Image: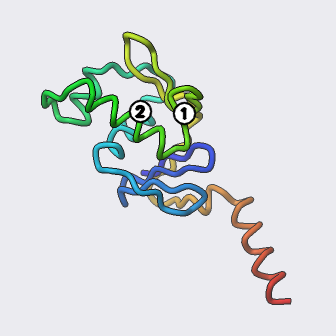
């Protein structure tokens, strides 16, 4: 499954975050946090839910959770001030603010993003001319 939002793709099968097709390095727990938030698009995900889904119920400090959220924002070129993709619901949890498109098995992001493919093809043809 691939989750697409803005110019980002979150590929669960490859455990990869990409921006405009280029891989962006993220730690495994940060990747899992992004998946959890993307799958819960528009809904506030509580701290307890994140601990259950990302850390399998292990006891982790608030600083660990905060660091993971900060790293997720950095991977998306977001910040705690801007909160374009990940919004904080004070005292409640976090919410993924972007519009997420799910691309299922058998589909690829390149097929779903036809204008991008057309632009690349046009550039290749222009370079050959």
For the point 74% across and 59% down, the residue is 115
What scheme was used to colour the molecule? rainbow
Q: Total number of numbered labels?
A: 2
Secondary element at tag 1:
loop
In front of the other: label 2 or label 1?
1
Label 2 sits on residue: 37
The Cα–Cα distance between marks 2 and 1, rounded to whole angstroms, is 10 Å
- Image quadrant in which the C terminus is located: bottom right
Whether residue 68 is situated above or below residue 106 in the rendered picture: above
Residue 16 point in image, percent of width and height:
41, 57
Whether residue 7 is situated above or below residue 45 in the rendered picture: below
- Can you name the residue that lies furthest to the top here? 91
Among the two numbered marks 2 and 1 on one chain, the one whose residue lies closer to the N terminus:
2
For the point 28% across and 24% down, the residue is 49
- Can you name the residue that lies furthest to the bottom here? 129
- Comparing 104 with 4, the one in front is 4
For the point 46% across and 20% down, the residue is 88
Residue 17 point in image, percent of width and height:
45, 53
Badge 1 crowding class, 10 Å Cα cut-off, few under 14, some 14 to 19, many 20 or more, is many
Secondary element at tag 2:
helix
Q: Would you identify the image quadrant in which residue 63 lies?
A: top left
Badge 2 crowding class, 10 Å Cα cut-off, few under 14, some 14 to 19, many 20 or more, is many
**Residue 85 has which mark?**
1
Residue 75 point in image, percent of width and height:
47, 46
Q: Would you identify the image quadrant in which residue 36 lies?
A: top left
């Amino acid at each position: 499954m691939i989750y697409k939002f803005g110019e980002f793709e979150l590929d669960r099968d490859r455990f990869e975050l990409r921006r405009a097709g280029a891989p962006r390095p993220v730690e495994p727990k940060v990747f899992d946090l992004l998946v959890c938030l993307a799958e819960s698009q528009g809904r506030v995900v509580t701290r307890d839910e994140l601990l259950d889904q990302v850390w399998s119920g292990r006891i982790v400090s608030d600083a660990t959770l905060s660091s993971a959220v900060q790293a997720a924002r950095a991977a998306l070129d977001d910040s705690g001030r801007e909160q374009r993709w990940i919004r904080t619901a004070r005292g409640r949890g976090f919410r993924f603010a972007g519009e997420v498109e799910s691309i299922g098995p058998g589909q690829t992001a390149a097929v779903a993003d036809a204008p991008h493919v057309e632009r690349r093809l046009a550039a290749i043809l222009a370079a050959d001319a």
